[in-house]
Structure formats: structure tokens, C-alpha cells
Image (tube, rainbow, N blue to C red):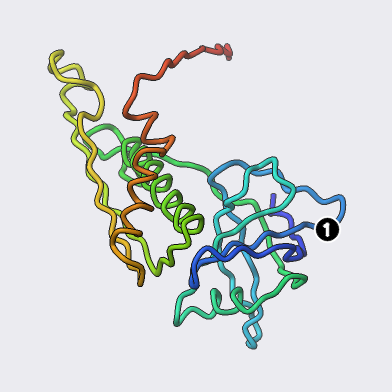
Amino acid sequence: MPAPHYEAVVERIHEWTPSTRSLFLRLPAGARMPFHAGQFISLALPSGESAPLVRPYSLASDPGDALLEICVDLVPAGAGSQYLFSLGVGATLSLKGPFGSLMVDEPPELGGVDGAPNPFEVLLSALAGCVTAGIATNAQMFGVPIDAIDIEMEADVDARGMLGHDKSVRNGVTDIRYTVTIQSPASEEKVRKCKETIDRKSPVRDTLANPVNITSTLVYKPR
């Protein structure tokens, strides 16, 4: 079934940095677009050519929010992001969605085809997203301009544990390291505050660093 088409209105704009802003979109009256976290929409942007520019944007809003939020980074040579940055409140956008499902895979030696990130990589992506989003939020609250954020993640895991080859080896990750590079005209002290605050307050980091109670349930469906 093809994804439905909507004509949305830009109801609000929030500027995180001079080159990053969120657009909050309202669908037509009575329209709803149910989606799950991690899905994205496809925007059809005027290009002056016969065919519009089609650009995907992840949905940054909660599925229960009244408005759809997309976060846009201005790319100097990007016609799509430049067009979106030119829009004001009241502008309309043509979109389709939602699209995308979270897929995981494993390398061939673990029974997969290596066609998607493995579960450990998805786990690290969640931490990376939490840290970088938190830095951007802190920068906004502290009045620190940020031009760019980059994060590199590393983790140590020994497959002998989860494969049952060595019971003395832990099943999961033993160590996680990340390096954050931030470009900003502000002082290093102010930039460091943005990063170290989220190091202390990141809910994903807290979840990984501290014991968590996990329960599971089996729902059996006979053929």
C-alpha cells in the first residue's frame, strides 16, 4: 500500500544553531499520520525543474505530539536544505509517509548477511544520538553557538561469551568509549560545559552504566 500524501503547514520554527533548525508541521484538519519512533517522511520540494526534489527527513517528534518535527541541517551546496531554511511560518510542504522500519542483522559468521547494523551498533547509535542531541539542547539553553558536532563510538565485546564458548567471558559489551568533536566560535570552557552536562544527565548513558531490571514475556501462537 503506498504511503499517504499530505499538505502540511509550517506552524513553528526553532533555531538550534545558525545552521540547524527544527520545523514543526501541522497536517490538514482531521488528518493523522500514525508512526513509530525511528521512521521518516519524504518531502517533495520545488526545484524549478519538471520534477521536485525528494528529500527524506527523520521524524524528531513523539508519535503522540500534535505537530510533526523535522530537524534540518543547512548544507551549503544542498538545494533541499537551503529551500527549507528559506521557509517561514505558514509555508506549506508536500510530504508522504511514514517510511522506515528498524532492521538489524549480523555478519555471515553469525548467521546473517551483514545487510544492516548489528544490535550492538544500534545500541551505540542510541547513545550517540542521545549525547549529540543533548549537547545541542544544552548549547541552546546556555547560549553557546555550535557550527558542527561529530561523535566517534567504540565498544569492546567478546563473542565467545554470547556464543557460549567461554563461560568466564561476559555476554555483552564491557567498555564503551566515545570522542565528541565540536566546532564553535565560543570558548572551550563553554563548549565543554555543554558536553560534560549531558555526560552526567544522558538517560541512555545512565541506562547502560547502571543495573536495569528487565523482564520478558513469551506470547505463543500455534500454527
Q: Which residue is mark 1?
A: 28
Which image quadrant is residue 104 in? top left
Q: Residue at x 50, y 67 (%)?
A: 20
Q: So how many labels did they put on this image? A: 1
Residue closest to the far right: 29
Please give left or right for residue 51 compared with residue 211 in the image.
Answer: right
* For residue 170, side relative to residue 151 (left or right): left
- Reply above or below: 29 against 165: below
Residue 199: percent from the left, percent from the top? 34, 42
Of the pair 185 and 213, the residue shown nearer to us = 185
Residue 139 is situated, as x and y percent measured from the top left of the image, at: 45, 58
In depth, the one of 172 and 151 nearer the eye is 151
Q: Disc 1 residue type?
A: Pro
Q: Position of residue 47 (x, y in %)?
A: 62, 83
Q: Quadrant of residue 213?
A: top left
Residue 191 position, x and y percent, is 34, 59
The answer to whether 187 is drawn above or below residue 50 in the figure is above
Q: Residue at x 63, y 55 (%)?
A: 69
Describe the element under mark 1 as helix, strand or loop.
loop
Q: Quadrant of the C terminus?
A: top right
**In which quarter of the view is residue 109 placed?**
top left
* Residue 153 shown left or right of residue 21 in the figure: left
Residue at the image point whose x is 37% and y is 41% from the top: 127
User: Residue reaching furthest bottom?
Assistant: 48
Q: Nearer the viewer, residue 84 or 18?
A: 18
Badge 1 density bin: few <14, some 14–19, many ≥20, Cα 10 Å: few
Task: Look at 19% across and 16% down and name the residue there.
Answer: 164
